[in-house]
Image: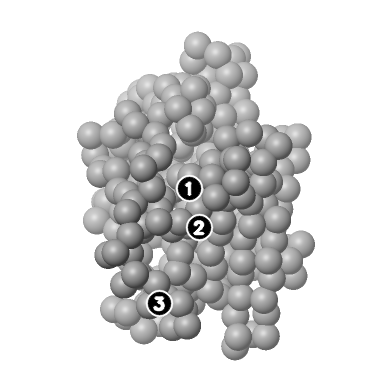
């Protein structure tokens, strides 16, 4: 089971489809684009968010053209993204040098308008305190005009915990909790670094602590989950989420939920924000 949940990148990157993860909605692709002829793609029955992790891309779809990205790496700038609806034929190409691009997808049946997302469209949040301090950008939040897809970027300073307290979103108990499939795509500030991810579900008699490396992809179909960046290496991850209900609602592990109250007496990590515009 652990092997199925945690995937190391091949030379070509990642190309996860819902059937690969055994779920219904979320897809994830990460690839390097070298300068050259545009690559032709179709969104099919997936709404997509194209998120350049490094470099700049030019995209053309539905009679429109966009220039997206520009950061040298995920540790050097805030995100831009291009939302594309289902049924879109599109082309993408790297501009001015190679680009690394994540294609975040959610299977759906409703079409929305394409839209460019820049730093003017979201807030940069600093969450938690002490050793649970982190930086969060919700690139596609629940109020974004899409049908299923949610996209979040998170930066965790070296030595800190993230997605903490451990939480889950695998029960239909709205508004307290909704069911969401989720992927974590990890980058480390140095390729020598690593982190840890714990995924556990008492109901399923499952508890696993996994070592995560640069470019690893973790699938979270259910259960409580949390991550930590080891000392010396800042951690980034890109979350893709989708479910029947489009909301970022989760339940903390009741054994650790009290930690939130302790943050009021702690300072936030002064290294934050790790990334600015």
Between 267 and 81, which is closer to the camera in this rendering?
267
Q: How many marks?
A: 3
Name above or below for residue 167 compared with residue 202.
above
Instruction: Please give left or right for residue 107 compared with residue 269 in the image.
Output: right
Find residue 243 and report its image quarter. Answer: bottom left
Q: How many residues crowd around disc 1 within 10 Å: few (fewer than 14), some, or many (20 or more)? A: many
The answer to whether the residue labelled 1 contacts the one labelled 2, judged by CB atoms less than 8 Å apart, is yes
Q: CA distance from mark 2 to mark 3?
A: 14 Å
Q: Position of residue 191 (x, y in %)?
A: 67, 35
- The secondary structure type at the circle numbered 2 is strand
Between 135 and 268, which is closer to the camera in this rendering?
268
Q: Which residue is mark 2?
A: 161
| Image point (47%, 83%), residue name | 255
Q: Position of residue 53 (x, y in %)?
A: 50, 33
The answer to whether residue 106 of the structure is visible from this angle is no
Q: Which residue is mark 1?
A: 156
Q: Position of residue 58 (x, y in %)?
A: 44, 22
Instruction: Please give left or right for residue 180 compared with residue 144 in the image.
Output: right
Instruction: Please give left or right for residue 270 compared with residue 159 in the image.
Output: left
- The secondary structure type at the circle numbered 3 is loop
Q: Position of residue 208 (x, y in %)?
A: 69, 71
Q: Earlier in the sequence, mark 3 or mark 1?
A: 1
Q: Which residue is mark 3?
A: 257
Q: Which mark is residue 68?
A: none
Q: CA distance from mark 1 to mark 2?
A: 7 Å
Give the quarter of the figure containing the C terminus.
top left
Q: How many residues crowd around disc 2 within 10 Å: few (fewer than 14), some, or many (20 or more)? A: many
Between 30 and 250, which is closer to the camera in this rendering?
250
Furthest-bottom residue in view? 203
């Amino acid at each position: 089971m652990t092997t199925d949940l945690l995937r190391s990148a091949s030379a070509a990157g990642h190309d996860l489809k819902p059937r690969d993860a055994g779920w219904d909605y979320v897809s994830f692709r990460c690839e390097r684009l070298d300068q050259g002829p545009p690559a032709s793609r179709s969104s099919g029955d997936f709404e997509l968010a194209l998120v350049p992790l490094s470099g700049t891309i030019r995209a053309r779809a539905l009679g429109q053209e966009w220039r997206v990205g520009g950061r040298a790496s995920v540790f050097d700038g805030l995100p831009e993204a291009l939302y594309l609806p289902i049924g879109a034929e599109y082309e993408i190409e790297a501009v001015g040098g190679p680009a690394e691009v994540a294609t975040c997808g959610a299977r759906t049946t409703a079409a929305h308008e394409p839209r460019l997302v820049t730093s003017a469209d979201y807030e940069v949040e600093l969450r938690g305190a002490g050793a649970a301090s982190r930086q969060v950008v919700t690139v596609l939040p629940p109020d974004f005009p899409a049908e299923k897809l949610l996209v979040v970027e998170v930066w965790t300073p070296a030595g800190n915990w993230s997605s903490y307290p451990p939480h889950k979103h695998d029960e239909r108990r709205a508004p307290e909790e909704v069911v969401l499939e989720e992927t974590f795509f990890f980058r480390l500030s140095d390729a020598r670094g690593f982190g840890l991810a714990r995924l556990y579900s008492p109901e399923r008699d499952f508890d696993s602590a996994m070592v995560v490396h640069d470019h690893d992809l973790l699938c979270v179909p259910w259960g409580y989950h949390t991550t930590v960046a080891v000392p010396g290496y800042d951690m980034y991850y890109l979350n893709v989420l989708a479910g029947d209900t489009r909301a970022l609602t989760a339940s903390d592990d009741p054994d650790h939920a009290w930690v939130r109250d302790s943050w009021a007496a702690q300072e936030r990590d002064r290294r934050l924000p790790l990334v600015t515009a």
